[in-house]
């Protein structure tokens, strides 16, 4: 969004009273980085995003050289800071490699769901009547299933794997964004500036994307950040059930599923670290999402 | 009020019809011959024909759907392909285990979450507030199956104080009545067995209850904070009422509505979470049955359980809506 109208520097006292103009987003950014917890969230998410991008790029995963049957289930030590798993694979390395699956699917499923969902919501709210009824009905049907159940059903149908999990999680997330976008449209549709745009003859698509869409950006940004957190939990759950990433490729949930066999033998490190990675990443996105909400709409601040 | 209830209940019917079409289409969308996929490559022609017959695959699609819908309305969800058990009866036999787990989890969530939220709001900025909100934030970020495994590792494997899974110790002889074992053991007056069921329930309920607990605590805190800043609370304080009275009678009562809202929203989470918790704790409910059926490609079970859970979920959501309308008349007239 462009700058707000600058106060005219006409009067003598203007130099002391006025401040340089700031846009909505810069204002929000200042509030965001002033918030300690949000900064922590940002640091965590950036760390894991970097891990997900850099590690597979620098050290491409190679299943053949990964296993080392001499060093099975070693407890954490200097050369394996997080120990090794049942095939002698370094747990820390697998966690770093697995970041790609969790974050890749988490971020991309939310992005795709945002595009599809908000388009559906915008169009149905804007056109109203039958289109609106039909779209919202379809969303109601999708929301008749608890999220994870729908995702499991989709993967059970399409077959296990990371790509199908991505598809499943995307489908499950669409209704949320459709509802948010639709409610923004409904709240601004009758406002005067929209009528003004109509009066000067702006085409519908222009009104929708230029004048209405920007209003839904901040709630969608907040929901999207929190949505990545729940998508990461879902991908881990699918992986844990054996429906997500297939072996030998590392994925945090699947690593936890493997660790179950060693629960009674005291190999705590194969259980602890992948779970911590999931929890930290999800915590990071949750903190960032909460921070974004406070920054973008100070009125909604919880306290 | 009655017209609101009727409208809300009738409105659900088309949604449920579409849900049934989706669940029906589920089996037909699988690429290839469902009978062959379910039975595997080495199946005999005879078995394949039997399954095709059983699923009605040799009839036109709309006829198949109408049969499916008609049977479902009469409470017949078909038969398992592998063991030939009637799905409805199995669902009903296993569902009490899931309910028991979900109720226990909700109890844990409410008993800890609400007081924690109230105290955090009253003692805002205290160590208790910071601590419990930190725990709540970690709680919502945890994969529950991981939490479950950690609980097993700590309490069962390391400390040996609680069982690793199941509802009863293996080999225990007990004939259930309602299949809610906590209740049944009491009804039969078997006190040692009652404590045994509680010990088996403790860890799964804690694992499943943690996320709702965290969400309820956060919502209770923010709802209480809002109420506590109202004028009538200051008035109550000013006229010299005891703190505990102001908090429970004046503040908490008015803070309920948002709390009920999140509690209602947790039902879906509990149903989803039960799938994972039951898998981790070998809990013989419908969630674990669903997962086993997916591995075994026993699709009639998958269909039946999915339809059943969706029904429960929609039913609960509608009931929660009606409950709000009862509590808050503004909703009825919107």
Image (cartoon, coloured by chain):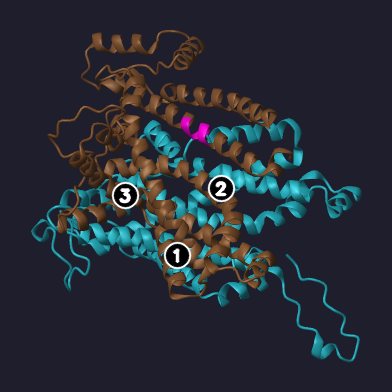
- Name the element at disc 1: helix
Where on the picture, by quarter, is residue A47? bottom left
Crowding around mark 2 (Cα neighbors within 10 Å: few <14, some 14 to 19, many 20+) is some
The answer to whether the residue labelled 3 contacts the one labelled 2, judged by CB atoms less than 8 Å apart, is no
Query: In the image, residue B187 lies at what x, y percent?
Result: 28, 32
Q: Secondary structure at mark 2?
A: helix
Q: Chain of mark 1?
A: A
Give the labeled residue for mark 2. Answer: B261
**How far apart are the alpha carbons under marks 3 and 2?**
25 Å
Q: Colour of chain A?
A: cyan
Q: Nearer the viewer, residue B144 or B67?
A: B144
The residue sitting at the left extreme is A70
- Please check the rendered image and state whether residue A61 is part of the magenta-colored stretch, yes or no: no
In the image, the segment drawn in magenta is: B312-316
Q: Is residue A259 above or below residue B329?
A: below
**Residue nearest the viewer, comparing A34 with A58:** A34
Vertical placement of residue B7 versus B217, above or below: above
Q: Whole-percent x and y of residue A12?
A: 89, 91
Q: Main secondary structure of the magenta part?
A: helix
> For mark 1, what is the residue?
A284
Identify the subunit bearing mark 2: B
Chain colored brown:
B
Whether discs 3 and 2 lie on one chain: the answer is: yes
| In-front residue for pair B229/A25 | B229
Find residue B72 and report its horizontal and vertical position in percent: 45, 17
- Please report the residue visible at 75 percent of the width from the left and 54 percent of the height from the top: A210
Assess disc 3: are there few (<14), some (14-19) or many (≥20) residues with their C-alpha within 10 Å of its C-alpha. many
Camera-near label (1 vs 2) is: 2
Residue placed most toward the observer, B117 or A108: B117
Q: Residue at x 43, y 61 (%)?
A: B136
Mark 3 vs mark 1: give the one in front. Answer: 3
Give the labeled residue for mark 3.
B145
């Amino acid at each position: 969004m462009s700058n707000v109208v600058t106060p005219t520097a006409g009067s003598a006292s203007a130099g002391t009273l006025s401040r340089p103009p700031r846009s909505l987003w810069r204002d929000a950014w200042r509030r965001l980085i002033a918030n300690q917890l949000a900064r922590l969230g940002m640091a965590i998410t950036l760390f894991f995003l970097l891990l997900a991008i850099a590690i597979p790029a620098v050290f491409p995963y190679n299943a053949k050289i990964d296993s080392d049957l001499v060093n099975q289930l070693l407890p954490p030590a200097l050369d394996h800071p997080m120990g090794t798993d049942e095939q002698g694979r370094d747990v820390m390395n697998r966690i770093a490699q697995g970041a790609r699956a969790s974050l890749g699917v988490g971020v991309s499923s939310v992005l795709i769901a945002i595009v599809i969902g908000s388009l559906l919501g915008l169009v149905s709210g804007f056109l109203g009547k039958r289109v609106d009824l039909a779209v919202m009905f379809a969303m109601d049907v999708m929301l008749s299933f608890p999220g994870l159940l729908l995702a499991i059903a989709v993967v059970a149908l399409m077959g296990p794997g990371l790509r199908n999990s991505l598809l499943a999680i995307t489908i499950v997330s669409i209704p949320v964004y459709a509802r948010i976008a639709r409610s923004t449209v409904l709240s601004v549709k009758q406002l005067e500036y929209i009528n003004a745009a109509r009066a000067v003859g702006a085409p519908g698509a222009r009104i929708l994307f230029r004048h209405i869409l920007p209003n839904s950006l901040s709630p969608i940004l907040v929901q999207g950040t929190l949505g990545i957190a729940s998508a990461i939990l879902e991908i881990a759950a699918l992986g844990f059930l054996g429906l997500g990433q297939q072996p030998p490729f590392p994925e945090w949930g699947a690593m936890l599923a493997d660790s179950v066999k060693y629960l009674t033998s005291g190999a705590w490190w194969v259980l602890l670290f992948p779970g911590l990675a999931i929890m930290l990443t999800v915590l990071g996105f949750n903190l960032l999402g909460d921070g974004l909400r406070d920054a973008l709409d100070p009125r909604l601040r919880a306290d | 009020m009655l017209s609101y209830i009727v409208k809300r209940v009738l409105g659900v019917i088309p949604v449920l019809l579409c849900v049934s079409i989706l669940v029906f289409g589920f089996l037909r969308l699988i690429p290839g011959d469902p009978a062959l996929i379910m039975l595997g490559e080495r199946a005999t022609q005879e078995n394949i024909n039997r399954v095709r017959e059983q699923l009605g695959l040799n009839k036109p699609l709309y006829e198949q759907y109408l049969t499916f819908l008609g049977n479902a309305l009469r409470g017949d969800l078909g038969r398992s392909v592998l063991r030939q058990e009637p799905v409805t009866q199995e669902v009903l036999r296993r569902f009490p285990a899931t309910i028991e787990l979900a109720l226990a989890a909700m109890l844990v969530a409410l008993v800890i979450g609400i007081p924690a939220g109230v105290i955090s709001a009253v003692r805002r900025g205290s160590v208790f507030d910071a601590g419990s909100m930190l725990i709540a934030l970690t709680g919502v970020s945890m994969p529950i199956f991981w939490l479950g495994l950690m609980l097993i590792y700590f309490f069962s494997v390391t400390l040996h104080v609680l069982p690793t899974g199941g509802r009863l110790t293996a080999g225990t002889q007990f004939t259930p009545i309602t299949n809610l074992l906590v209740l049944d053991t009491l009804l039969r007056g078997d006190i040692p067995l009652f404590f045994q069921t509680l010990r088996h329930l403790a860890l799964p309920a804690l694992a499943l209850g943690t996320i709702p607990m965290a969400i309820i605590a956060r919502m209770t805190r923010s709802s209480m904070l809002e109420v506590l800043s109202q004028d009538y609370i200051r008035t109550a304080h000013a006229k010299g009422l005891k703190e505990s009275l102001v908090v429970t009678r004046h503040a908490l009562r008015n803070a309920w509505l948002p709390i009920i809202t999140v509690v209602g929203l947790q039902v879906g989470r509990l149903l989803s979470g039960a799938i994972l918790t039951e898998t981790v704790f070998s809990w013989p409910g419908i969630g674990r049955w669903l997962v086993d059926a997916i591995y075994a490609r026993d699709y009639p079970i998958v269909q039946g359980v999915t339809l059943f859970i969706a029904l429960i979920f929609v039913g609960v959501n509608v009931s929660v809506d009606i409950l709000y309308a009862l509590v808050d008349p503004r909703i009825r007239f919107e």
